[in-house]
Amino acid sequence: MLMASTVFTKRLVGYSIFTLACCVGAQASASLEDTIKAEIQAAKDDFHKVKHQVNDEARQIEAKDHMFKNPTEMAEGHFWDATDLSPELSKHVADQAHLHLMTQKKFPSAQDCSVCHPFHFEGWAASGHAYAQVSPIFNAMQGTFIERTGGTNGDFCIRCHTPVGMTLNEPLFTANENRAPISREGVTCVVCHRLDEEYGRVSGRFPMKEGPIYDEMYGPLGNEVIKEVIARYYVSPSPDVNPGAEQIHKGTEKVSVFQKPVFCGMCHDVNSQNGFRLETAYTQFLNSPAAEKGQTCQDCHMSKTPGQPLSGYHHGPVAEIGGQPTPNQRLTDHSFHGPDYSIIHAGVYPHSVEGPAIAPFPEWFNFDYAAGWGSAKFELEKAGSTDFPQFWRDRKLRIRARIFIDNQIKRMETFNVGRLQLLRRGYQFRSFELTQNNDEGIEFDLTIQNGTDGHAVPTGFDAERVVFVQVTVTDKEGTVVFQSGDRDPNGDLRDDLSRYVHNGEVPYDEFLMSLQSDFLALNLRGGQRPEILTVDYSGTPQPFIRPNTASSLLVGHPPDTRKAVNSLPPNGSRTGTYKVRQDQLTGKGPYMVNIKFISQMMPVHLVWDVSGVGFDYGLSAKQIGERLVGGALTLWEHNIVLDAPTAHIDLRPTEEEIVTTDKDPYAQNRWYTYIQSLLHRK
């Protein structure tokens, strides 16, 4: 499992040189030890050289047009031995090379942008925008919508998740390895920075200006700095100017919409074909206290501290040209922290310049880093008895991949600190009120609150966001006498959509305090039932998106579907009452209440609902479900001893508690240290 592998690799983090003495088997020869040690150190030196000199080495290993003449030349450019490529992989490399060559003339990739904009790239690379298309759950959802509607759903979902891919007329549903590399980047740089006007709430349907990297970009800053760069530095703003020099865009046009909330509203307010309000984040913001104060989406989600508009923005060089930083300006953080987290291989996510230089996209999924491939212990003790895939038979390549993977995991740990801080700001305990504590039973009220004033929490695709309170009451010996917010054997909560609850195998959780909204569909007999996806099942031979039987414009909503919103409004709160019956008590007090506020990306029952079309990367529904549950974050946890008949406890967190975590992810993250060095240059 992915989570298990993360735990394994964390034991390796922090060694400047792998300590071999503790892992050398009794039969391992000293010469083999020395060889592996030297290979590891050489690979580390090479890797860190790239990380610290991004505008030199990173440019050398980056994909270039001239590297894509044939698979052999591409393989040599990426340090692969083309003779080791199978015919299938060789064809894949050739196809990807052709795709990159064609798309680069229309849309520069984030890798192209990373050369001059390392700060922005590093934030974006692990963001929800970067994860939008490579998510195996989304890909299966897209396939399910296409299947259930006979294709008439069209690009409604996927046009937001890979705008470049849809502009390139890629298939509506296919494995991600078949897409162009820039299409896998999801909401990549050009999706925003090739927009030159405001389109309003268009549910993600807007044009991007096509053109190579030389063409103008658009953003919140003017053209002065780029003019100075072109005048002062040896750069190439067009093919006929300084050929072979650093390629840059010839200009930057300031477009005011980049600093307005409506820019986010182009994607983050979604109406389906029948007028169903699928996502309303932007609408919620427009009616929020934050909007009344003149704050913007960007003030919270691109600021120094995630979710804290008062923290302001970073200031530093927007670009670095040939190792020289540009003058300091306002820097916006492109991390866009949110509820999503990766459940795919660390070789391909976060996005990186180095990953494609080590292995082609599909080969990463064959690299078993959970088993320790490339580590000193594994290479000494187990490599000899392991049947490696053809591509990964070279030990030096495995060592190189291992060092890269370890750094990828550190990058995610760094990123996840911001995710935790953002979610803690939105989801908070307010108070605990003990109203009864005697031999006849226990009763208490637990109040939760939305600590922000910009929109509801959860927002966006709120019917698939799992945010809930888990309550466990134990006696003094640790025996559990009461539970709410626990899971069924599949990993789902015990609610209406649990298959175990539906089958009568586990009881319904009547005390569950969940913030997950519900999609409700109208039944033929007039009642409503919850559904997982917003596309109804159809019994006809040719299912399709059906026109409404009544005017949505006149009645204000679609006639057959609606959403029961359970989110907390801005600054809103909700109180749940919990009761432990007399027959549940053991008489062994004092009792203790453990409360947890938990956030999970998506529910496991969604995985089952979309599993009919299969999952990308060879993942099974079980693997995805386990990774979803394993990635859930406990935002807050309190243990309360019931040693009084009544009590009131204020649980509202301080700012220090919101931003403090039990991890220090920055200490060994050299890439992060390098980025910070740019921010503090004078």
Image: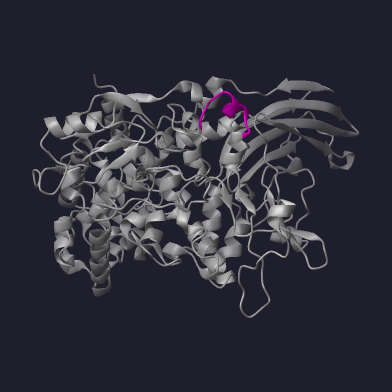
Colour approach in the figure = one colour
Q: Where is residue 342 in the image (x, y as percent from the top left)?
A: 45, 49
Q: Residue at x 50, y 25 (%)?
A: 309
Can residue 291 be found in the magenta stretch?
yes
Q: Position of residue 562 (x, y in %)?
A: 71, 54
Of residue 384 and residue 104, the one placed in the foreground of this image is 104
Would residue 22 be found to the left or right of residue 479 on screen? left
Would residue 55 be found to the left or right of residue 369 on screen? left
Q: Position of residue 200 (x, y in %)?
A: 51, 44
Of residue 506 and residue 474, the one placed in the foreground of this image is 506
Query: Does residue 595 show up?
Result: yes
**Residue 140 position (above or below residue 543):** above
Would residue 37 be found to the left or right of residue 382 on screen? left
Residue 608: quarter of image: bottom right
**Residue 5 position (above or below residue 284):** below
Number of numbered tags placed on the structure image: 0
Q: Main secondary structure of the magenta part?
A: loop
Which corner quadrant holds the C terminus? top left
Range drawn in magenta? 287-296
Q: Which residue is drawn at 74% across and 36% down?
A: 474
Query: Does residue 21 show up?
Result: no
Residue occupying the far front of the picture: 554
Residue occupying the far bottom of the picture: 541
Can residue 601 be found in the magenta stretch?
no
Q: Where is residue 82 in the image (x, y as percent from the top left)?
A: 17, 65
Q: Which residue is drawn at 64% across and 55% down?
A: 275
Residue 507: quarter of image: bottom right
